Image (tube, rainbow, N blue to C red):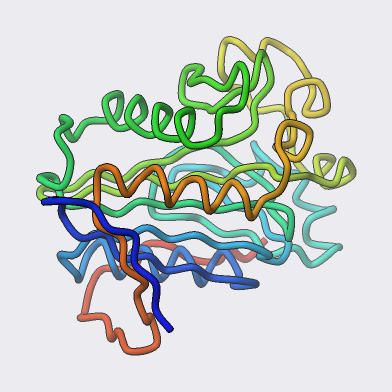
Amino acid sequence: MKRSWRSHIRPNLHLIHLKNIPIFKQLQLEEGLLRSDDRNFLIINEGSPRSIVMGISGKPEELIHTASVKQDKIPVIKRFSGGGTVIVDENTLFISFILSKDALDIHPYPEPILRWSADLYKDAWKIPNFHLRENDYCIGEKKCGGNAQYIKKDRWLHHTSFLWDYTHSNMNYLLMPAKRPKYRQDRDHLDFLTPLKEHTISQKTLIENLKETIVKQLYISEFDITSWEPKAHRQSAHLINL
């Protein structure tokens, strides 16, 4: 039975809750919804298998240990948005918003979208010292989530990979990027990251609290993605052959 979280006189927000879907499939879905649909969507994905995801302008030789990645057969994906390089796995929580520019009372530009989303998570999760630092979500001085955006004429997308937990050895596939947030300084991944599981009860609680908070701004209804067929659109997300 489909559930709805009601909000008064608010635009509709269609919820797509995925489990165990590869991040490449999620990115293909997001790009289709962004480019070929005009509705508002919230996409949540849990349990995605291990992959490396790069921004649209990322260069593998500058960002990852290509020989190790190739040897261990880890998929490498370029998303259609900007942002940095991340390695994701079953312990990554993906949350994406795809909204029309008139859905919220904010300016559809990167900084206002970042501030809106950070305030939303702060209000929903009540995690002490959770805040926006440059383009990242942090708890104290450590990063717990990274963001990327795509803004077009009448719609925008904001997607985040949150670290519910992470495998330390996976970080060895990533190089220290030449371009990095100032607050990171020269810290390696283990000193720079903090998993959400150390700051809250459960991933399920985070998801439910997010739904209960976003309903103050938008009317949420569950969306059956199996009935959706995309129209023809440009497809920029792709796998990279190393």
- Name the one closer to the observer, 8 or 179: 8
Residue, far bottom: 227
Left or right of 241, for residue 217 = left
Q: Quadrant of residue 80?
A: bottom left
The residue that appears at 85% across and 46% down in the rendered structure is: 167
Image position of 53 with respect to 32: above or below: above
Q: Quadrant of residue 174?
A: top right
Image position of 122 with respect to 76: above or below: above
- Name the one closer to the observer, 209 or 155: 209
Left or right of 127, for residue 87 = right
Numbered label tally: 0
How far from the left and from the top, in percent, is residue 178? 62, 22
Left or right of 157, for residue 173 = right
How far from the left and from the top, in percent, is residue 182? 57, 10
- Name the one closer to the observer, 87 or 197: 197
The residue that appears at 64% across and 36% down in the rendered structure is: 62
The quarter of the rendered structure image containing the N terminus is: bottom left
The residue that appears at 68% across and 59% down in the rendered structure is: 51
How far from the left and from the top, in percent, is residue 192? 74, 22
The quarter of the rendered structure image containing the C terminus is: bottom right
The residue that appears at 60% across and 71% down in the rendered structure is: 19
- Name the one closer to the observer, 28 or 215: 215
How far from the left and from the top, in percent, is residue 151? 23, 44
Image position of 80 with respect to 186: above or below: below
